[in-house]
Image: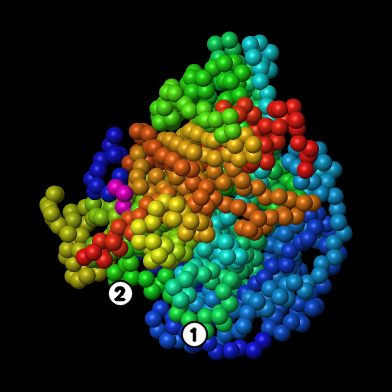
Amino acid sequence: MAARTIHFTLNGERVSAEIEPHHNLVELLQRHFELFGARESCGQGLCGCCTVLVNGVAVSGCLTLAVTVDGAEVLTIEHLGSGDALDPIQEAFIENGAFQCGFCTPGFILMTKQLLDAHPNPDDNQIRHYLSGNLCRCAAYPEVVQAVKSAARKRGSRVAA
Amino acid sequence: MATTTMQGKQVGRSVPRLEAREKVSGRAEYVHNLRLPGMLYGKIFRSTVPHGRIRGIDTSAARDVPGVHRVVTADDVRNVIPSPYYGPAFHDQPILAVDKVRYVGEPVAVVLASDPHVAEAAAQLIVADYEEMPAVFDEVEAMTSTAVVHEELKPAGTFPDLKHLKGRKNTNVALDFQLRRGDVDKALATAAHVFEHTFRTQQVLHVPLEPFVSVADASASGATIYTASQSPSFVRIEIARLLGWPENKVRVKVPYLGGGFGAKLYIKLEALTTALSLIARRPVKVSLTMEEQFYTLTKHAATLRIKSGVDTDGRITARKCDVWWNGGAYADIGPRVTQKSGFTAPGPYDIDNVSIDSYALYTHLPPAGALRGFGIPQLVWAYECHTDMIARAIGEDAIAFRRKNILREGRPQATGTAMKDAAIDAVLDRLGQRMNWDGVFDRGSEKLRRGRGIAIGFKASISPTTSMAIVNLYADGSCGLYCSTVDMGQGSDTAMAQIVGEVLNVPAETVKVVHPDTDVTPYDMATLGSRSTYHMGHAVRLAAEDARAKVEALARELGLPEGTNYAVSDLFKKKYGMQAGNIVGVGSFIPSYTPPDYATGQTPNATPFWMVGGTGAEVEVDTETGHVRVTRLVNVADVGRPINPKIVETQLSGGALMQLGFTMFEKMHFDGGQVTNASLADYKIPGIFDVPTVMENEIVNAEQTSGPFGAKGVGETATFGVSPAIANAIDDAVGVRLTDLPLNAEAVFRALRTKANNPLEDA
């Protein structure tokens, strides 16, 4: 199969990669950029472990062919926060104990980012609706709901300040 | 109360997980991330028949695919490992199928390639020719079936109580455990009421979101295995045994796990990847897909028959339990489940006359092993449904009937072991109070009927098992903890660091926890059965105390007067003239234990500690559809004194929600031994919409006096009561009794129609 070169913005930097047309976005991030925060688990776009933001929209990296991010803005969990400072969502997940094994956590956090970008003060139904495609076998769901609310408050107060 | 001294104020504090930052930034280390130079990927070709003799395997087309390094079958494996059979209880499982296959999905061959896509495509070109043989899938049928899974039983010899099984032929019974106490037959004959019911549980799956993955880099000079395993020490011992090597030639490293739940115990992919690496002379990685997890390890389905005699005062006088465990084609740890959990089959009740017969059965299904409870949730399902049915039949309140019959402190359990530090009464009382049991309960409408139920369960910690730990003080006074407990999400790194911090009077956050690496970290039996807090907790405490004693000895050696306020780093400087040196504290722990009598199962010391959990459920049943909504789930547990209350609460909550999936919808479907729903599209696990409207978790005020700082295990406790509590609530709501799991809408609707004398035809 013919390799081809794609160019895109990854976590704020212009990058390019030579890929096979059957490679998915998770493989692209892992093989070419050593980014392992997006993980393939179910392989069917049902668990959310491979969540990546493409042009600001959360996608399942396992179902997204790498070629389709040519020219796109790709953001992964590794880019959240700035320097040593965590993003308020990451802080909230830690403070509320919203994970155990951590394998699904990057996906939950990126989906929460998309939720809060669209709904800065989400109610329980909005939280559940947005996060219904993210599975956590440790079942930290009650703590996740608390973390999302706490993250919303943190983001709100930072905007106000 | 000496063990609860809050010297360092670290124990009892809700320290956030030490690795939290790495986990929220996607940088935590999992085997999943690992790639070694020159590494090959292995893709497994699996059996399509449940039982058959292998006539031939045609690998030519796969071999010819460009990019394929080689194709490996059992013949190649036997060149490097002459007797390629492994297992913790029985040496019955071949690395790749030898001569026969025994379940659909059994590994038969492996394709190795540098590109996993090439390996996957090539594996699909392999053709195997089987002479199909009769198969047996049901655990009760397996007792008498002429279809026999193994020609001869091969107990591992590790466990003295399995030795008598060696060489048995023409049987699917891998272990028959029995317990006899009092005279059950006589007590049943004279009882005022006798009740007998049969219950079933279904095959379900662990579904860690990080599927099984191992990397091996092996040559004649030694093997290094990087693996998502809950039992690095066992992996080393078993790989060394298979290769005829000393332990020190095998190194096993385990980073974080993306969930385990009992799946990643003993040997899973480690023997295969080691053999592949020896054959290929290159590092080999095998990562299973989600689908392949369904062919690797399941939770035991079980059939449980339970019969009780009750006197006119509502006291249970006799209980007879027969349990058949569906172990699948390879024993894994099933025989241990059969016995070590089997002896709690009568429940946490004070019954003078008890008999238990518990059978581990081989069938032609994927192997079954431990899953968050080691068989206990299956047993509680039976005895707590049964107990509720008795209370209903004799017109007693569900809590009052239990309170009359529960095991109290000091009373003998079925094994004869006296109960100690098991807060069964407190759990039951708090459950009743939390559920407002004596208050008015809204019964809902004709269409949406409401009901409530409770259940309690207990577990004996598996015994005897050993943990070792090392606490290393470095020259600047900082310290590292070396232990082989695997943090798979339960927070053991954090809890163990708290114990070190408590003893050495330093913040837990400053303790470095060195991850399992058998070249570096000492022996631990395994991370299983909620044993780590107690066993490793003690070993870590002892290691830290040993380090502290050595610091004090060094101070004396250096002539510092008793009680001098010195920094550890100053001692090192004074001793070695510069920032240099180490102080190494070691600790080892094995609890006392008395093996049960073979014929009666009696022992004065069955376990170091008891775990107690209870659940209350409120449900809403749609009488038109059979749909059940759990509106409230209350979990109450005796965990001793929690080391980290917040993490303990998330363990309780998470355990209960996992069991909610096993209760309401999870089920592996089989057709002729083939799993037909091997994907998350067809096998649903709980998502955020499945969380009950109200969830409450409570840790009762209790102490494990023999535990480290009063603590004991908690990982499994909240799973015990969930299933029967919900079934009891459904009965309370609509008057139907479900005896098989899961309690899905179809099952409830069928039961409602049957009750209305208008049964549905079987599908």
Q: Closer to the observer: label 1 or label 2?
A: 1
x and y percentages locating residue B417 in the rendered image: 50, 28
* Left or right of B312 in this view: B6: left
Q: Report the predominant secondary structure element of the magenta stretch.
A: loop
Q: Give percent across and percent down for residue A96.
A: 35, 53
The vertical placement of A98 against B325, above or below, is below
Q: How is the image coloured?
A: rainbow
The relative height of residue A61 versus residue B356 in the rendered view (above or below) is below
Circle 1 residue: A71
**In-front residue for pair B51/B682:** B682
> Between A14 and B559, which is closer to the camera in this rendering?
A14
Q: Chain of mark 2?
A: A
Within 10 Å of disc 2 (Cα), the crowding (few <14, some 14-19, many 20+) is: few
Which mark, residue B661? none
The reply to the same-chain question for discs 1 and 2 is yes
Quadrant hosting residue B585 = bottom left
Q: Residue at x 72, y 54 (%)?
A: B675
Residue B334 appears in which quarter of the rendering? top right
Task: Give how far across and how far down residue A9 sits, in percent.
Answer: 44, 83
Q: Is residue B236 visible?
A: no
Which residue is under mark 2?
A83
> B629 or B601: nearer the eye?
B629
The part of the chain drawn in magenta is: B13-17
Residue B613 location (% of width, % of height): 47, 35
Near mark 1 (Cα within 10 A), the count class, few <14, some 14-19 or many ≥20, is some
- In the image shown, does B166 or B654 lie closer to the viewer? B654
**Extreme front residue here?**
B446
- Residue B506 in view in this figure: yes
